[in-house]
Amino acid sequence: MQSYKVRDTQIASYLIALGFENYSLEKEGNRACFIFKLLDENSPLNVFETRINDYYANNVKIEPKKLFNAYREVKSRIAVLFNKSKYA
């Protein structure tokens, strides 16, 4: 299965808000790394790079609520990963 690593929480949140929800989270030293996986083997891996380029070019349209919910999810999962959540 093809995968794409992301260490930036804002980019990870953006990708999740776009619908890339098949991911895992791993520690890399004192940082979190999101590993997004493509469900369809026929999808090009550069779909991630295209979306990220759109993000940096400010060429995106996304519902703010989706983005903020994804960001909260990312921060919560990182807190659990590093045992910094009161719910862990």
Image (tube, helix red, strand yellow):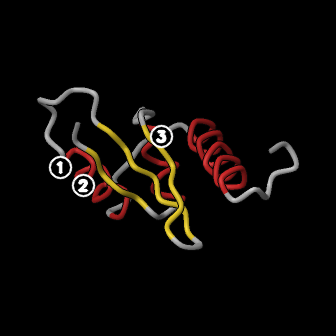
Q: Amino acid at mark 2?
A: Glu
The answer to whether the residues at label 2 and label 1 have Cβ atoms under 8 Å apart is yes
Mark-to-mark CA distance, 2 and 1: 5 Å
* Front residue of 66 and 43: 43
Picture coordinates of residue 75 (x, y %)?
67, 53
Q: Which residue is mark 1?
A: 46
The answer to whether 37 appears left or right of 44 in the picture is: right
Q: Quadrant of residue 2?
A: top left
SS for tag 1?
helix
Q: Which residue is mark 2?
A: 49
Mark-to-mark CA distance, 3 and 1: 16 Å
Mark-to-mark CA distance, 3 and 2: 14 Å
SS for tag 2?
helix
Quadrant in which the C terminus appears: top right
How packed is label 3: few (under 14 Cα within 10 Å), some, or many (20 or more)?
many
Picture coordinates of residue 34 (x, y %)?
46, 52
Vertical placement of residue 57 versus 38, above or below: below
Q: Which residue reaches farthest right? A: 86
The answer to whether 51 appears left or right of 7 in the picture is: left
How packed is label 2: few (under 14 Cα within 10 Å), some, or many (20 or more)?
few
How packed is label 1: few (under 14 Cα within 10 Å), some, or many (20 or more)?
few
SS for tag 3?
helix
Q: Earlier in the sequence, mark 3 or mark 1?
A: 3
Q: Which residue is mark 3?
A: 16
Vertical placement of residue 29 versus 36, above or below: below
Quadrant in which the N terminus appears: top left
Q: Residue at x 24, y 55 (%)?
A: 49
